[in-house]
Image (cartoon, rainbow, N blue to C red):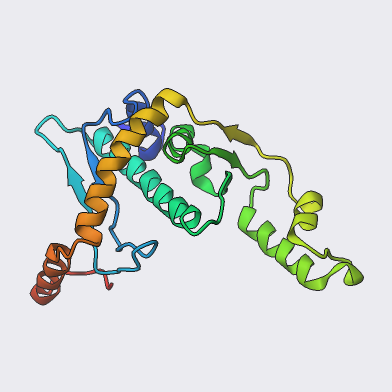
Amino acid sequence: AAEKRGVSIQDLLTLKAETLGPGGSGLLALDWWQGNRSTLGRSDLSGVLVGATLNTRAEDIFHALVEATAFGTRAIVESFTGQELPVHTLVAGGGLTRNAMLMQIYADVTGRQIAVAGAPQASALGAAMLGAVAAGSARGGYDSLQAAAIRMAPSPQRVYEPIQVNRDRYDLLYGEYRRLYDYFGRGGNEVMPLLRGLRRRSGSDAVAD
């Protein structure tokens, strides 16, 4: 279907999913396909999809997984704020910033403004800024990251603001996400390591941990 329309699979799934709204898929997921390095630091965890029925479609799963990555981002943000490290605004870079649905979900879930970096190669620019600070003003650089950012970072391409009604619904869903997060990640439940161990012993695990 994507080939017939001349679009990528991601674009097609986004087109079908963008009208669902918060929780509109009827699904809730943990996107721990390669474990949860942050904030749990456990590579033995795996994914969860709750709520699937015979009516569940590919775009429902896609939407739920996008929401799951946003919930995971919120958990990381809360780990900072819980240590009294304030996070007021997020800056996003990379290819996924071209997906407006994804970016709006991230803003709604985190409850924070998300600016899309103005530089097409944001990571490279960040490395250049660090290099300029390492050089210092005496060698043609800058004495602080703030000074480097003012001079070197272009204005954001776009800024996403949280939509309050979506944020309220995501707060409800996030509470349930945290129940799953704690139960499988911190609650002493060992079903995920058990399943991965059985798969390894069967010789069918083609991807190394």
Residue at 20 percent across and 51 percent down: it is 48
Give the percent coordinates (x, y) of residue 134: 76, 72
Give the percent coordinates (x, y) of residue 46: 23, 60
Q: Which of 79 and 45 is in front in this view?
A: 79
Give the side of residue 7 with respect to residue 185, left or right.
right
Residue at 9 percent across and 33 percent down: it is 54
Figure disc tally: 0
- Above/below status of 5 relative to 79: above
Residue at 29 percent across and 69 percent down: it is 43
Give the percent coordinates (x, y) of residue 177: 27, 45
Q: Quadrant of the C terminus?
A: bottom left
Residue at 49 percent across and 33 percent down: it is 100
Give the side of residue 2 with respect to residue 142, left or right.
left
- Above/below status of 123 relative to 91: below
Q: In this rendering, does residue 62 appear at all?
A: no
Residue found at the very far right of the displayed protein: 138
Q: Nearer the viewer, residue 10 or 136?
A: 136
Q: Quadrant of the N terminus?
A: top left
Give the side of residue 88 with respect to residue 48, left or right.
right
The picture quadrant where one finds residue 20 is: top left
Give the percent coordinates (x, y) of residue 133: 77, 67
Q: In this rendering, does residue 166 appear at all?
A: yes
